[in-house]
Image (spheres, coloured by chain):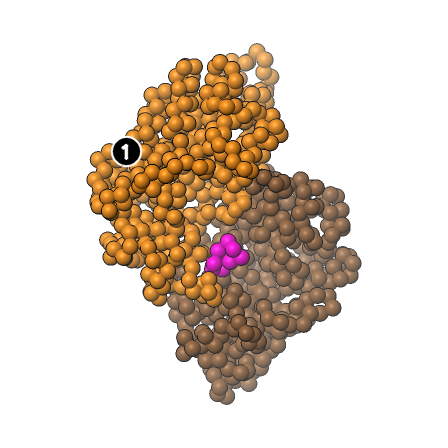
Amino acid sequence: MPRIEDFSVSRRGFLIGAAALPALAQEQPKRIAIITTIYRYLSHGQHMGDRFLVGYPHEGAWHRPDMKVVSLYVDQKPEGDLSASRAAEFGFKVYPTIAETLRCGGDKLAVDAVLIIAEHGEYPVNDIGQKLYPRYEFFSQCVKVFEQDKRAVPVYSDKHLSYSFEKAEKMVADSRRLKFPMLAGSSLPVTWRLPDVELPLGGQIEEALMVGENGSDDAMDFHALEGLQCMVERRGKGEHGVRAVQWLEGPSVWQANWSKDLLAAALSRSDTPLGLTVKDGRTQDLLANGELQKLVPNPIAYVIEYRDSLRATMLNLKGALQDFNFAARVKGHGILSTQFLLTPEPNVTYSACLMNKVEQMFSERKAPYPVERTLLTSGIVEACHKSRGMGGRRLETPHLAVRYTPPAVSQYCRT
Amino acid sequence: MKLAAIVTVYRKYSHGQHIVDRFLEGYGWNGQHHHPAMDLVSLYVDEVPADDLSRERAARFPAMKIYPTITEALTLGGSKLAVDGVVIVGEHGNYPKTPKGQVQYPRYRFFEETVKVFRDSGKSVPVFNDKHLSWNWEWAKSMYDTSRSMGFPFLAGSSLPVTWRIPSLEMPDGATVSEALTICYGGVDSYDFHGLETLQCMLERRKGGETGVKWLQAYRGEKFWDAMRAGVWSKKLFDAALCRSHTLTPARAGFNDIFPSMEDMQRLIMDPVAYQYQHEDGPLATMILASGLVRDFNFAATLKGRSTPLSTQMYLPMPDGRTTLASFFSPLVRHVEEMFLTGKAPYPIERTLLTTGLTAAGVDSLYAGQTRLETPHLKIRYQPSAGSTYWRS
């Protein structure tokens, strides 16, 4: 505990005995700025931002972060906007610009951390199906303030960094250049798993598969792909990036080069099989009973070839199930499989798992897992949508040579 | 190996459907679709409503025949017991209520008709009985005694002890527990039993094992709130259990997950009920039905040597809009299979004998004006299974 010792040494004249801890507790709570697209009931902005206002369940207690939200920027105020009522109740101000939000209306950066939640709201969709959330734009405005005021603070950016890998790369480069901790991504990597399974660190993954349900836009597929990424990054000598991707759609998905036994394993973890289960409650072996192809008129596969030759597939089986399930064949371990549990609305407690990681970064000024995971996933999402735009052609991705080391300690919710 | 199933009703999402279907269709287990290594060859269904599924199942699984009586289901129409195991599911269906409000599910009748075949055949086979043994304590005790005197393996109870736990944790072996609490939902003589099994599967692992229960008192309505305010059960444990819930009703409009105040809870909980009871060796236990506040089963306990409560959620992926498949029946059926395969119950029937008695005592206390009842008949001693039996793989 070097920090406490240093502190007690520097204050030796004022401290008696074990008074170091109470003295630390008197530190001012960290000041948080929230930058969001919208703040409406059950938007990411609301359920993530609120965790810093009213606390959240954590390890069997209601945890209230020792932090204070001091300012808020909302890009849009649709019907049901809660920003003004939250500001009035919790004693912070809504500012008209991001710069003012970070400076709390003054002339210098006046917060200790920034929470960027650019999910939900009305934004255009590009011609390859990506919704153009202004994450890069929000982030860049924060960076501009950091540069002008010669101080940078930790930033969390919700979901993928940007619809554009080029912009995402700039974001990560900015955080390195200005040396501020940065975290991003989905709740899937940090939520509960059923069963509580982690892949062995340094293990040899032979093939991996994620099965999800989503609208084939870049909102839900990002979650599935980052869930996949947080598992496969633990292989071998860490992540070395992606060589090529391919978007497959329609009947060719069933004939594609992914293992049926991995799909069987993933499906066996699902609590939401559709079709006959909805009709009369029965359990189903969706692969063996021939129902899968009937239930999924338009299967989609995101095929990912990693630079170390690992092959992973994300199957979007809309119509067959409604949860996220993973399976991988790992040398010496056989097939390992689990469900990433997305707990129900309205509590969506998985976002508490995620905000706990963000809170940890804000207080320790160190990201608990690498933002490169989200950088790579952002690039995979974009590349898959580009492949889609090219009629499902295999797309080489030399720009996705993203290398990183996964965290040594598992980061998902398990206590 | 041949099995007979005796069920009250076989309709979508009835326990009969959940359990029997798993023997017929198989189910997801350990990362694959598992088919039990046994054949369910006969079925007796007590009620056949318009939405019955048993006929459809029998048509699709011709190896399973439907018989008009329990005796014929067990003898496969012959004169002697012709199956190697019996699955009794006496839950759901239309049965009359007692003056105390208990649904008179015919578990005792099903069991008695089953053991009559055993006696007449001079042979017994393992029996699984879903949920508590009977609404009637005397009958439940008689079922237990019969199984012991005839010497056949007997398993019963709820899915709660065997389902996933979030987080995945067990009561440490030999822990010293001073108090435990469960917050769940549902009604009297229904989900109260599940809440009691949630408590008991954890408490039975305490130091010395189970010693039985001395007394029980139920609280309902205003008396529940008086007891809550007076600290009759630990608010710290209550809060810890509540913080394991994934289904906390938001106390305020516009907030999706906010910790409720006492006033909030008084507004939100419809018909609050608590059963509090004390074990012979001291630990105090409280089962709370908080419909309107939560829709899951959450456990917390005070353990010697721990500054914070041990807490977890016994997770039911409930097909009430949250899922489509009640996967918590999978570990239950897996344990039933294990009993049939090994001839040994994987966890003690005494757990369910005790929770059956506690359920009846809770109903009795409510009926007697929420008075404290001494429970000398619940001095049930037993040791838990050596290994954990909840879902982890």
- Closer to us: B92 or A44: A44
At a point 59% along the width and 46% down the height, the residue shown is: B248
Q: Quadrant of residue B189?
A: bottom right
Taking the spot 56% from the left edge, 74% from the top edge, the residue there is B49
Indicate the position of residue A279 as horizontal and vertical percent values: 46, 65
**Which one is nearer the viewer's eye here, A65 or A185?**
A185
Question: Is A224 placed left or right of B170 in the picture?
Answer: left
Q: Nearer the viewer, residue B364 or A140?
A: A140
Magenta span includes A17: no
Q: Is residue B285 above or below residue B120?
A: above
- Colour of chain A, in one word, is orange
Horizontal arrangement in the rendering, residue B177 relative to residue B386 (left or right): right
The chain letter for the residue carrying disc 1 is A
Q: Residues within 10 Å of mark 1 (few under 14, many from 20)?
A: some
Q: Is residue A182 visible?
A: yes
Q: Amino acid at mark 1?
A: Arg
Residue under the point 35% across and 23% down: A174
Vertical relation: A157 (above or below) B27: above
- A361, above or below B85, in the image: above
Give coordinates of residue A271: x percent, y percent.
Answer: 45, 56
Residue B311 percent across, percent down from the top left: 56, 46
Against B117, is A332 above or below? Answer: above
Residue B387 at least partly seen: no
Outermost residue, bottom direction? B79
Q: Position of residue B232 (x, y in %)?
A: 72, 46
Q: Which residue is mark 1?
A: A403
Give the residue displayed 24% in from the left and 47% down from the top. Answer: A392
Among the chains pictured, the one given brown colouring is B
- The magenta-colored residue range is B317-328
